[in-house]
Amino acid sequence: MSEKQTILIIEDERAISNFIGRALTANDYRVIPAFSGREGLSLLFSHGPDLVLLDLGLPDMDGLEVLAQLRGLPKEVPVIIISARDRESEKVKALDMGADDYVVKPFGVSELLARIRSALRRSDRLKLSQGNQRDVYQIKDLTIDLTRHQVLLGDEEIHFTQNEFKIIELLAIYAGKVLTYDFILKHVWGPYSSSGNNQILRVNMANIRRKLRENPSDPKYIHTELGIGYRMLDD
Amino acid sequence: MGLGHTLSSWCRQAVEQVRRLPDVPRDLVLTAAIFLLAYWACSILIHHTGGQNNSSLVFVLAVVLISLVTKGYIYGIAASIVGAFFINYSFMYPYAAFSLSISGYPVTMLSMVAISCIVCTLTARLKRQAVEAVRREKKAKALYEMNEKLNAEKAAIQLRSDRETIRSNILRAVSHDLRTPLTSISGAASVLLSSEEISPKNATMLTDIKQDADTLIAMVENLLSVTRIQDGTLPLQKQEEMLEEVAGDALITTRRRFPDYHIELDISDDILYLPMDSMLIKQVIVNLLENAIRHSGDQEHIRLSLFRQERWAVVEVRDHGRGLTPDVLESVRAGRPLERALSGDTTRGMGIGLSVCQSIIKAHGGFFAADNDPKGGAVFRFGLPMEEAEHE
């Protein structure tokens, strides 16, 4: 990867856009700032960035509308949402509409950088695999073998129930991306699963955590997005 | 004098006793009394006026009186019929004998019965209408008073809720509008801190800027929490949550601000899945952890534990520091905010942090307690009900 990766920042608050821009430039990314939704979309078409940072509270158009237009593009660009806390439900909507991840104001620089790296890695992986699913996923010392239905933690095999395995499988396939409760429910329990199944999902997750000996305050494999969903870490 | 007095008091007692009787016996007694009075008056009159007597008129008067004081017109009609017979028998020639053979007698009797019947139905109707009118008036008055009361209450509630809405809108706007600039101050400071062009001398100042911006951000979070619960007038946004996920998130947030502190998290084997406003509960845990970090003087052994105790999901923050002063213990026990004097420099932010915690937990129907471990250090503990209370 000789060329610098380009990141488009669609954010109307100049001070926020400035410091994010500085942090990204310092970390060897090329930055294009846009201060409104329309400007963002036109820069998106002309520059074809590798990643988009999108603020949901834009002055000229709804951030979700920008996301919808962006998703209409043939080339899939990873999107990280910048949201204020009072837009909780929009955040879930944005994730369900295909955004990869989100940060909530106030956020720290290192947190943002980690999420950008993770989203870019994921998009690179997608490009390399060209849509073919892998059979084995490796996350740190965790090996998830989809063909053999096997999970190894180091050399030790960990036994999961069928649904627990399905959840891990799904998170592994989308590693680096935040999956909402609804998304996981639909994929594991089928399209007609009711939201009442949420409890089953959460309890399954608590069991997975115990089997993987995960500490929720310092997760190695699965990160909890409080009230939103889960994300498998990929570094 | 003495006799008149005795008589009148006797009469009053009699009237009082009659009034206390139930309807039917009372009406019977009254009818009989008036009837006897009329009979007595006629028998006196007949001595003075002789044959040319006006006893029928006296009886008509008696019937009117009876129908006035009794219920319905049965007593009046009965009295008029019985009266007609008595007049005929006692006060008309031939005395002490019943006779219809003398010309004019049947007409007198019939017309007397007819007149008293009509009079007493009329009085009964009048009486009913009067009673009805009184009842209507009472009802209207009660309705009016109730309406007045309701209006006053409504106005008071309206005023109060208007004030609350304005207050919370201002607080929310301020918190929200503060957050964006604070994010950029803290963010810009950390970008500068990581660049190589900054001299160590400037770096310390930048660290101060960043830390103070982060402290302000934490305070804004507390303000925002306060606007969301404010005296329990706003409903909590409760959802079932896994407590360990909330606690984990709170710990991650705290660790980001205080990377040098070591905090242990103990999750129990029990699955603690219960209804709560997760943002607010996270805020409580963050406040308690920050409290331990700032005030205990302990950097190593801060411990966050989750466990189930009967019907409570309990969160405990324990340190091995210098413990709590009696003032803090007392104010937590009494559930009142810390005195201003206590939250001077050494305990900056402790007062507001703890009182926010207490009101959040109270709004959840939980308990909040603080204590000193006999082996040293402070213990803060709060519990949330595992099940929604039944009345909710």
Image: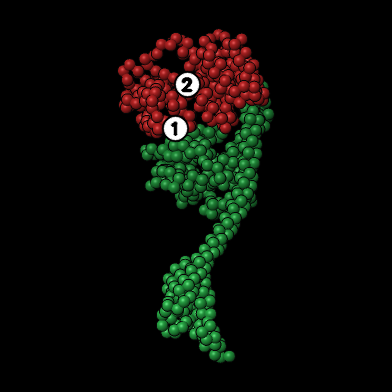
Q: Looking at this view, is B347 or A107 the one in front?
A: A107
Chain of the residue under label 2: A
Which residue is pictured at 55% across the width and 35% down the height? B258
Q: Name chain A's colour.
A: red
Q: Looking at this view, is B220 or B64 the one in front?
A: B64
The mark found on residue B366 in the picture is none
Residue closest to the far front: B103
Examine the image and state in which quarter residue B356 appears: top right
Examine the image and state in which quarter residue B26 appears: bottom left
Q: Name chain B's colour.
A: green
Residue B346 screen position, x and y as percent? 61, 46
Residue at image mark 1: A216
Which residue is pictured at 64% across the width and 47% down the height? B159
Query: Which of the two discs, 2 and 1, labels the residue nearer the N terminus?
Result: 2
Please state which of the two labelled residues, at mark 2 or mark 1, is closer to the viewer.
2
Chain of the residue under label 1: A
For label 1, count other residues whose C-alpha is less than 10 Å away and answer few (under 14), some (14-19) or many (20+): many
